[in-house]
Image: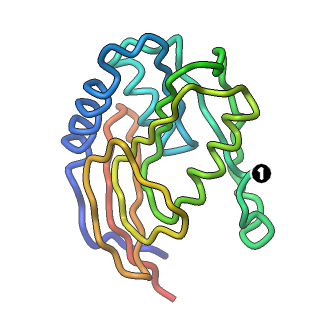
């Protein structure tokens, strides 16, 4: 079972991310926010509310689009993809909680293209932990963390909507 080794001020990190996204979308007429289930979806909900983009909010589950699906199998908590706006020509901010290998981002982009052709896709992540396997970089990121191979970052959302972000160490 993972155990927490360090806590971050996830609420302060969220504010940094929110301000970066707000500045990055300044003057963008056709902006939309799409969160990757589950942590990215939580962040996207809050960003959409804070930026007045609730009508341009969508959610993606990448379970069936991952290139490692055969190896990892199906995640037990598959959520429906829901994009209730026209993606064609939109500037989409794709939101994930933690950027790691880039495989989730690649899968999410594939899902987006099933819904249309955005003018631009910008990536926002609360944390970048390095370890990229694909050439993916976030346009907006609140913090960068170097982690060991047996560590991971975990975003959680309390019932009141407050975020916590912890480094967890897996015990073999």
- Residue at which label 1 appears: 64
Mark 1: few, some, or many residues within 10 Å (few <14, many ≥20)? some
Kindly identify the residue that appears in the image at 71 percent across and 52 percent down: 63
Rendering coords of residue 75 (x, y %): 70, 57
117 to 153, vertically: above or below: above
Horizontally, residue 100 falls left or right of residue 114, namely left
Horizontally, residue 77 falls left or right of residue 49, namely right
Secondary structure type for disc 1: loop
Rendering coords of residue 22 (x, y %): 29, 24
Of residue 1 and residue 33, the one placed in the foreground of this image is: 33
Rendering coords of residue 92 (x, y %): 51, 28
User: How was the colour assigned to the protein in this rendering?
Assistant: rainbow
Kindly identify the residue that appears in the image at 45 percent across and 31 percent down: 44
Kindly identify the residue that appears in the image at 76 percent across and 33 percent down: 114
Q: How many marks?
A: 1
Horizontally, residue 49 falls left or right of residue 89, namely left
Of residue 44 and residue 163, the one placed in the foreground of this image is: 44
Query: Residue at the bottom extreme?
Result: 172
Rendering coords of residue 82 (x, y %): 68, 27
**Where on the picture, by quarter, is residue 76?**
bottom right
Horizontally, residue 56 falls left or right of residue 64, namely left
Of residue 80 and residue 29, the one placed in the foreground of this image is: 29
**Where on the picture, by quarter, is residue 38?**
top right
Kindly identify the residue that appears in the image at 50 percent across and 61 percent down: 135
Query: Residue at the right extreme?
Result: 70
74 to 39, vertically: above or below: below
């Amino acid at each position: 079972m993972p155990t927490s080794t360090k806590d971050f001020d996830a609420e302060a990190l969220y504010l940094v991310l929110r301000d970066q996204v707000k500045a990055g979308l300044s003057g963008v007429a056709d902006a939309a926010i799409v969160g990757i289930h589950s942590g990215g979806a939580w962040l996207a909900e809050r960003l959409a509310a804070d930026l007045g983009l609730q009508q341009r909010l969508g959610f993606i589950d990448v379970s069936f689009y991952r290139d490692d699906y055969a190896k990892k199998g199906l995640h037990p908590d598959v959520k429906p993809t829901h994009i209730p706006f026209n993606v064609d020509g939109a500037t989409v901010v794709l939101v994930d909680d933690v950027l790691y290998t880039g495989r989730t981002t690649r899968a999410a982009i594939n899902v987006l293209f099933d819904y249309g052709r955005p003018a631009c896709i910008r990536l926002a992540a609360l944390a970048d932990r390095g370890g990229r396997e694909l050439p993916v970089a976030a346009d907006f990121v609140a913090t960068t963390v170097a982690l060991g191979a047996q560590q991971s970052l975990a975003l959680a959302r309390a019932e009141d909507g407050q975020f916590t972000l912890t480094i967890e160490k897996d015990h073999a």
